[in-house]
Image (cartoon, rainbow, N blue to C red):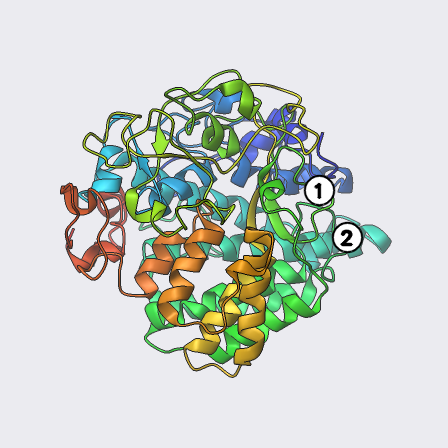
Amino acid sequence: MKKSNIKIKSLVITAAVAMLFSTTSCIKDLEREPMTDVTADVVFKDFGNYQNVLAKLYGGLAMGGQVSGDGGNYPDSDISGINGGFSQYTRLMYTLNVVSTDEAVIGWNDGNLHTIHKMTWDSSNEFITAMYYRIYTEIGLCNEFLRNVTDEKLAQNGITGSNLTEAKYMRAEARFLRAQSYYHALDMFGNVPFAKEDYLPGAVDGPPRIERAALFNFVEQELLASANDMKEAKTSVYGRADKAAAWALLARLYLNAGVYTGTQRNNDCITYCNKVIGAGYTLKSDYKSLFLADNDQNNPEAILTVNFDGINTQTNGGTTYLVHAAIGGSMKASDFGVNGGWSGLRTTKSFVEKFPANGADKRGNFYTDGQNLEINDLGSFNDGYAFIKYKNVKSNGSAGSNTNWVEADIPLYRLADIYLMYAEATLRGGNGNMTTAVEYVNQLRQRAYGNGSGNVSSINLDFILDERSRELSWEMTRRSDLIRFGKFTSGDYLWPWKGNVKGGKAVESYRNLFPIPAKDIIANPNLIQNPGY
């Protein structure tokens, strides 16, 4: 079991608390009216409840509902209109940011899922809608927590001494988690509804609209402020955010600033990369062990993770999805520590060709037996190589504690990404050192190749884009990377079935943003649909 003092199940068991901070699918209200006599005044009077409520904020990233297996459908799942397993946070992040790219295709025909890789989605797509509502569910949870841990409220509730100190750390974490979800809204949807803790649910017109550049500024300021108040880097419990998590997200924000605001912020990206690097993180020696069932153990590379285990986080999203859905054909589920495959996820020829054919780069871990490199039929698992990323297997070869629910944690930020961001920002004209940038890249390649044969003497931006895909594959960064390089919608880079054409084609540039769900445009008169939809 994961060694963390954030136990998701502790909040699931405390149903009254869970319901107090649940939300509907309507962003007009942001939070559902309490379905219990337990109120915030009661919950926050007792400091013993704070950790459970904070667990719900972290649990919002890990679980799709209130009970084992995500609860199926609403109200046991957190949002309505879609199964809780389908709507788990990281599973939706993967669907929109990986399946929409060259890194993955999926063979299922559930609803409008097939339109994601084909890039033919519209504003009624239930998976895009679920991502939007999942983001705002998390924001709503954080807002409710922040309303109740102001200095005034803490004093009223008699929170003093070491409890007061810890409550303020929790407040900073909640502020970070809210900023992180607003970052996801900024990245995927652009101009969106905006509400802080001073917005009270039930307003007639719903939250106001914030434009992308203004939201960038808000996320930046919130991350700077929360970083100032969070625990020092590497001093928090595994799975809880500290200063380094905020620095890592700031670096990512600044790297993409040109897309979000039209102004490059490469020097700032490098500044915050250096802060993370200076905090003492190091690379884990074995790349594959980063994605095993015990990747919470002896992992000096992880900055912040979404935690899963077979007991407390029994979700059909997370790594349970990433492992089961990637198994099919002649693959043996037992080799992955699970009880069966779902025959869904594979990858494209374009991704496979980024790796040397001789298999020297261990990050290119493909299963080819019975698989076709070419994808003639998106619905056939045998079309497209299978890609092995996560396993429910420990470093010693034993399976996780549960062969259905996968225990591997998902890294949101890790040192390898920081190294690559430093290198890219330097290449884009930032004030980094090019020799250092090459050294960072070569550290990753030495780990990948196991010797010096993969080392490079120079780098350029095209190389960095491919290296990010090799190193960070399936880690939910690919879409924003391609957009930053002008290759997501354009004809400059094609992959199989981009634009619903076997060989790929350019699509409309407005697809660099996803649409605001049609139902929310109707519900909130303050909103304006993104162009093209």
- Residue 305 placed where, x, y %? 60, 46
The residue depicted at 62 percent of the width and 72 percent of the height is: 274
Determine the residue located farthest toward the right in the rendered image: 161
Locate residue 276 relative to residue 331 in the image: left or right: right
Using the image, determine if residue 463 lies above or below residue 496.
below
Snapshot quadrant of residue 518: top left
Residue, disc 1: 50
Residue, disc 2: 166
- Residue 485 placed where, x, y %? 32, 66
The residue depicted at 71 percent of the width and 46 percent of the height is: 238
Amino acid marked by disc 1: Tyr
- Residue 381 placed where, x, y %? 31, 26
Using the image, determine if residue 311 lies above or below residue 322.
above
**Between disc 1 and disc 2, whose residue precedes?**
1
The residue depicted at 52 percent of the width and 79 percent of the height is: 434
- Residue 295 placed where, x, y %? 65, 40
Considering depth in this image, is 392 or 405 the residue closer to the camera? 392
Using the image, determine if residue 399 lies above or below residue 126.
above
Amino acid marked by disc 2: Glu
Can residue 67 be seen in this snapshot?
no
Snapshot quadrant of residue 8: top right
Determine the residue located farthest toward the top in the rendered image: 339
Q: Quadrant of the N terminus?
A: top right
Q: Secondary structure at mark 1?
A: helix
Considering depth in this image, is 416 or 529 the residue closer to the camera? 416
Locate residue 9 relative to residue 160 in the image: left or right: left
Can residue 220 be seen in this snapshot?
yes
Q: Secondary structure at mark 2?
A: helix
Using the image, determine if residue 276 lies above or below residue 35.
below
| CA distance separating discs 1 and 2 | 10 Å
Considering depth in this image, is 336 or 126 the residue closer to the camera? 336
* Badge 1 vs badge 2, beta-carbon distance below 8 Å: yes
